[in-house]
Image (spheres, rainbow, N blue to C red):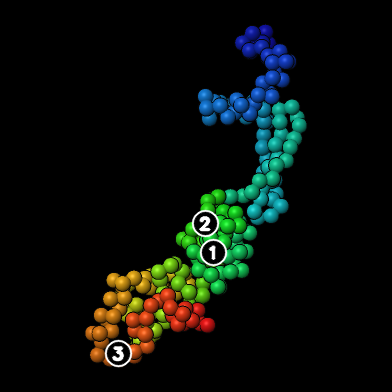
């Protein structure tokens, strides 16, 4: 015992300990305090930590027992890969059938909601939520700006939609497959030229004059694209 007492550093006097306790935030945040020192500081104060049964799926209860014998309970939000906060998920479900993923991302960010990783939403992040929870967008609305549906493209070309589907299945024209299996076609000038070239080279298709060169942003196109 004498040897142990001789090798143990004496405790600071009481006023020094109180001053140190009041100064802990500055010590913790100081750039000269290493992560190793922060861990040692925690171990000197906390005896153990216990995860308690959660109140709901979005939070976690944390029991803290201090070396003094005192205990505290904390409640923290549960963040992690693939876990979308309930508020964000509810908004996607409410507006998913009428809004594009880009529009939903704007709504989520405007509401101050974040992804499961604590980051702002993007159209891609919303698309992953749709895929994970089977929340499909309306088939008449392209997921991203600058894209159109098959029916929209067919109307622009003056041909049946079945012909466009046939090209897509065979991989003959550019497009991408969105969640839910919907085809989204990038309707830029270069892509439009590819589709019009397919029409011109087909001996079966007889395109109508139904606004073959119609501006995709016109009112008629808007009604076709949204079914109104």
Residue 194 x/y as whole percent: 27, 76
Residue 123 position within the rendered picture, expressed as x and y whole percent measured from the top left: 48, 61
Question: Residue 205 shows which numbered tag?
Answer: 3
Q: In terms of sequence position, does the residue under pointer 2 or pointer 3 come before the other?
A: 2
**Which residue lies at the image location 33% right of the left edge and 81% below the top edge?**
213
How many angstroms separate mark 2 from mark 1 (CA)? Answer: 9 Å
Q: Is residue 93 left or right of residue 164?
A: right
Q: Report which quarter residue 24 is drawn in.
A: top right
Report how far apart the C-alphas of labels 2 and 3 lie in the structure.
43 Å
Side of 138 relative to 52 (left or right): left
Which residue does the numbered mark 2 point to in the structure image?
Answer: 121
| 200 versus 149 height, above or below | below
On the image, which quarter does residue 108 sit in? bottom right
Is 36 drawn above or below residue 109 in the view shown? above
Pick whichever of labels 1 and 3 is earlier in the sequence: 1
Task: Find out whether the residues at labels 2 and 1 contact each other: C-beta distance under 8 Å.
Answer: yes
Residue 133 has which mark? Answer: none
Residue 83 visible to an observer of this rendering: no
- The residue to which callout 1 is attached is 104
Q: Would you say residue 219 is visible in this rendering?
A: yes
């Amino acid at each position: 015992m004498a040897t142990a007492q001789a090798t143990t550093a004496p405790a600071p006097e009481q006023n020094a300990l109180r001053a140190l306790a009041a100064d802990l935030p500055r010590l913790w945040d100081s750039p000269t305090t290493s992560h190793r020192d922060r861990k040692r500081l925690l171990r000197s104060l906390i005896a153990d930590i216990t995860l308690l049964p959660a109140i709901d799926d979005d939070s976690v209860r944390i029991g803290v027992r201090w070396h003094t014998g005192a205990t505290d309970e904390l409640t923290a939000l549960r963040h992690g890969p693939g876990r979308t906060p309930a508020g964000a998920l509810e908004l996607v479900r409410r507006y998913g059938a009428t809004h594009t993923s880009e529009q939903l991302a704007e709504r989520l960010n405007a509401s101050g909601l974040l992804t499961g990783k604590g980051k702002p939403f993007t159209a891609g992040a919303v698309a992953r939520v749709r895929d994970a929870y089977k929340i499909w967008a309306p088939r008449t609305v392209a997921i991203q700006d600058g894209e159109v549906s098959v029916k929209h493209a067919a109307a622009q070309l003056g041909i049946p939609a079945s012909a466009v589907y046939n090209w897509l299945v065979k991989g003959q024209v550019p497009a991408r497959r969105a969640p839910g299996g919907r085809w989204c076609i990038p309707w830029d000038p270069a892509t439009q030229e590819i589709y019009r070239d397919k029409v011109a080279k087909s001996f079966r298709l007889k395109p109508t004059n139904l606004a073959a060169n119609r501006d995709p942003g016109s009112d008629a196109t808007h009604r076709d694209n949204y079914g109104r």
